[in-house]
Amino acid sequence: MGIARKQSNVIAFARECLGGGAAYAGSGSGDNNNFAHAALLIDQDWEQHWIGWVPVWQTSFTMKAVRSMAENTHYDVIVIGSGPGGAALAQRLAPTGKHILILERGDYLPREEANWNARAVFVEGRYQADEHWVNKDGDTFVPQLHYNVGGNSKVYGAALFRLRERDFDELEHAGGVSPAWPLSYTDLAPWYDEAEALFHVHGRRGEDPLDPGTTAYPFVPVRHEPKVQALSDKLTGIGLNPFHLPLGILLDQKEDGFATPTSLCMRCSYFDGFPCLLNGKADAQVMCVDPMLRDYPNVTLLTGAYVERLETDASGRRVESVVVESNGREERYNADIVVVACGSLSSALLLLRSANDRHPNGLANGSDQVGRNYMRHEMSIVMAVMRHVNETVFQKTLALSDFYFDSGDPDYPHPLGLIQMCATSHADQIKGEAPLASVMQHLPDMPFEEIARHSMDFWLQTEDLPLPENRVYYQDGKVHLDLTETNEKSLDRLKAKLKQVLSEIGWPAMLIERSLYLGKDIPLSGTAHQAGTCRFGTDPATSVLNLDCRAHEVDNLYVTDASFFPSIGAVNPTLTIIANALRVASIIEERL
């Protein structure tokens, strides 16, 4: 059957099943393709050929169609949050046939030209949550949170690292001690394998001397462009070990590294920090949520569903009701298992506002650890301005871990962290940066476009250390986030190492701090890579969750975002979130 005829039939089928124009009128759209999008949730024998041509899952109408079919109030599993931790767990449970409800407070992130507009994304913060929190000094700021299907992964850089084996052990830093995990790398290794396959990770095993993986990456590494390859060769020439960045990306490459004609990803400069207009980034929506809605009628996604609180039974040992605010009305759902995966900050806040007589300090908070030990890496984005031109388009392909555990300096015998490349600077981003006066002082005659052409961009991160006083909490009806830097000296050392290394290879550079990256009005370090607000452990007095990531005090409550981290290492946390979510899903599957 031809595409046009098939589309027509599905549109008619959607009109019949969804009530025709009456159901459609509330969508705020007049595009008949939306009927076909909704019909895909019903007509599951439609092949995927047309799916790749038209954006199937991107309309609010689609979600309203799902909502209109989701009349049950009891489910086997309720998952709160559709980011990597929630979506990965749900997709692994979907084949069991158990009824799963995913609650997402946002909607699908709009697909529009502004997805690839640097000013809209970075300077205006178009896709960030419109919220104002209070920091430890009493000043308000806008947290860089994204409430949409797929969560923060819609704008992440898709760097998917395994924690290093030593990251699971106690580690001494200049700023203090990074505590050991109650599990070892070996416990997570098979789940890392599954997570890399699920999120289409591209890489080359054996290049990174600290990578603990032993199985080959599912896909070959994203090939360096000439300037990045030259950098790699020069770093190798001075005895360092640069490696291809492990990336979750839907890229099919030709021999020369360019995208094939049918590749979803086209290797553009709007990958890192931008939503992908082509759905070529391996985010939680693309890799987990959309396939579930297409393939499993037992999975329901409700958007615009803000979970106000969790209510327990009289004993306080079971979550009895999930109370949702949706379109100005209160709805209640219940399930045998409830999984919280809202992101470390939002998950802790949900538990805190779920206080009751049995849990007066917040749900599952007898230890007073909910919201505490917040971590997010000590991070810095630097633009290295050089005399030569950098014409690289897709720059995020190289990383360096030589200083991860060892600074190499006898006077500073401490770990430093990871250096990786990030997205190419765009002129509009540079214009919106805070340190413009410094830039123009050194480069008064260089327009912003030329600064971008003469720069390479690096993302540096050092391990952040857990402190009880680094916490998120409510006070006077407002969200407060208290944060004290824990390891800033090592981050400064890592920046100095980058500058030194660039000089040694003959590429001296002026390093300019980037203050606007995935954030608006605040530095990157505000809420990026959030982790650690509901740590897991064996002692209920000092931890919120047990080793299964189930709350010590609530028998049917699990948490599967990065809240469970007792320490964060110095690599991006997303792959560990996904791997652990898959592990916990296997535990829940046995319980079900």
Image (cartoon, helix red, strand yellow):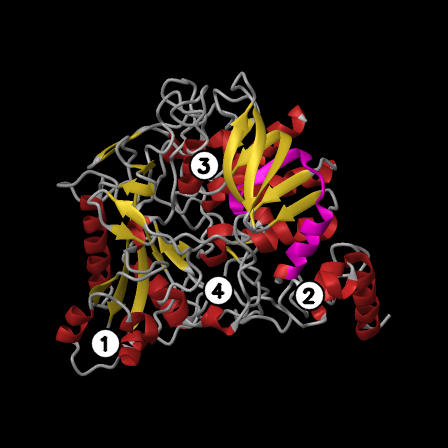
Front position in the image: 486 or 550: 550
Q: Residue at x 26, y 76 (%)?
A: 451
Q: CA distance from mark 3 to mark 4?
A: 42 Å
Q: Nearer the viewer's eye, disc 2 or disc 1?
A: 2
Residue highlighted by disc 4: 223
Image-quadrant location for residue 355: top left
Residue highlighted by disc 1: 387
Q: Quadrant of the C terminus?
A: top right
The answer to whether the residues at label 1 and label 3 have Cβ atoms under 8 Å apart is no
Q: CA distance from mark 2 to mark 4?
A: 47 Å
As drawn, the residue found furthest toward the front would be: 329
Residue highlighted by disc 3: 350
Q: CA distance from mark 1 to mark 3?
A: 50 Å
Q: Type of residue at label 1?
A: Arg
Is residue 2 placed above or below 158 in the rendered structure? Answer: below
Is residue 68 visible in the rendered image? The answer is yes
Q: Type of residue at label 3?
A: Leu
Q: Earlier in the sequence, mark 1 or mark 3?
A: 3
Binning the other alpha carbons within 10 Å of mark 1 as few (below 14), some (14 to 19) or many (20 upward) gives: few
Range shown magenta: 61-85
- Residue 283 locus on image (x, y percent): 54, 54
Q: CA distance from mark 4 to mark 1?
A: 25 Å
Front position in the image: 447 or 300: 300
Q: Earlier in the sequence, mark 2 or mark 1?
A: 2
Residue highlighted by disc 2: 25
Secondary structure at numbered mark 2: helix
Q: Nearer the viewer's eye, disc 2 or disc 4?
A: 2
Image-quadrant location for residue 56: bottom right
